[in-house]
Amino acid sequence: MNKRLLSALLLALLLCPLAALALPEDARVPGGVAVIPLADGSAPPPVAHFNGRRVLVVKDAGQWKAIVGIPLDTEPGPQQLAVGARRIAFEVQAKAYPEERLTVQRQYVAPNEEQLARIRAEQPRIQAALATYSDGTPQLLRFVRPVEGRESSPFGLRRYFNGEPRRPHSGLDIAAPTGTPVRAPAPGRVIDAGDFYFNGNTVFLDHGGGLVTMYCHLDRIDVTPGQLVERGDRLGTVGATGRVTGPHLHWSVVLNGTMVDPKLFLQP
C-alpha cells in the first residue's frame, strides 16, 4: 500500500466519529418519528422528554439530536419537545391509514372470564417491557429485516376483527412459513420472552435509550431474558401462536414507550 493511500485511510478513520449516523427516517406523522436537532455535540448530552417520557438522544455528525416516537393517536398540529426548561416546537402532519378486516377465532374477539383474567395478568408485564429505558444509546438505528417474507399487513391499519373495531395495527406483519428463522435486526438485550394470549410466543429486545423491539406469534423462542444478542442472532422461528390468521412475524418498534412504523428504521 502506497503512503498516499495509507494517509487517506488514516484520515478517514480520524474523521469517522464526526460522520453522519444512519438515523431513522424523519416522518412527523402519527405513528412516525421526528428527528430534532438539540445542541452542538461539544456540550453535554441534553435530556429531552415528549409527553412526559424520556426520548432517545444521539450524537450525529457533531450534533445532539432527539429521536422522538409520535403516538398513533396524536392529533395533527403543533407539538413540543421539552429539553430541560426549553421547549422546541415541531409540527405533526396528518396521515390516513387504510382499513383491514380479518376473521379470527371468536375467543380472540370475545374472551371468556378465564381468558380475560389471563389478559389482565399479562398486561403489566408487556407494558413494563415496552416502557424499558436503559442507559446508553443503540449501536445501530438502521435495521435489517428480522425475517425474509411478504409484508402482509403494514403498520397503522385501522383493524376490524370479525366486524368489530380494534386498536390500529401497531407493527409490521411479515408472512413466512412456520419454522423460518427470526433474527435480531440490531444488537440488543433480551428484556423478556414468553407466551402471551394475543401475541403468542413473544420476544422483547432492548437496544438502549428507550428503543425497544418486539417479535410476536413465534413458533419457538430461542433466547432467554438477560441474553445479549448481536445483529443476525436467532431469536426464534416464525409461527402462528396467539391471535393470527396464518403464520407470520408481527414486528413492532417502540420509541419512548410509543409504537412507531418499523419501516422507518429499515436500511434503504
Image: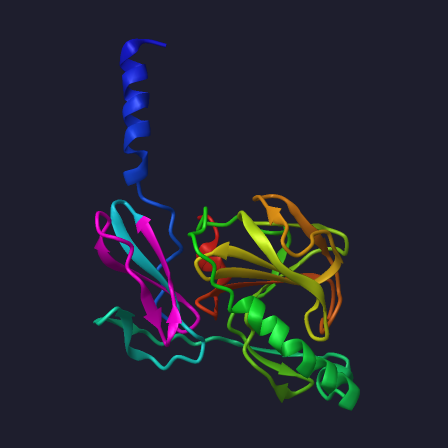
Whole-percent x, y for residue 116 in the image: 72, 86
Q: Residue at x 64, y 62 (%)?
A: 192
Q: In the displayed structure, does residue 59 sit left or right of residue 255?
A: left
Would residue 58 be counted in the magenta stretch? yes
Residue 195 lies, with reference to residue 265, above or below; the image says: below
Residue 193 colored in magenta in the image: no
Q: Residue at x 57, y 43 (%)?
A: 230
Residue span colored magenta: 30-59
On the question of residue 15 being in view, the answer is yes
Measuring from the top left, give residue 215's x and y in whole percent: 63, 61
Residue at the extreme top of the image, as rendered = 2
Identify which residue is drawn at 27% across, 25% down.
11
Q: Quadrant of the N terminus?
A: top left
User: Is residue 47 positioned above or below 149 on the image?
Assistant: below
Within the image, what quadrant is residue 49 found in? bottom left
Counting labels gives: 0
In this rendered view, identify the residue nearer to me: 141 or 226: 226
Say which of 194 and 67 sits in front.
194
The answer to whether residue 134 is left or right of residue 202 is left
Q: Position of residue 191 (x, y in %)?
A: 60, 59
Q: Is residue 91 above or below residue 27?
A: below
Task: Decide: is 155 above or below 118.
Answer: above
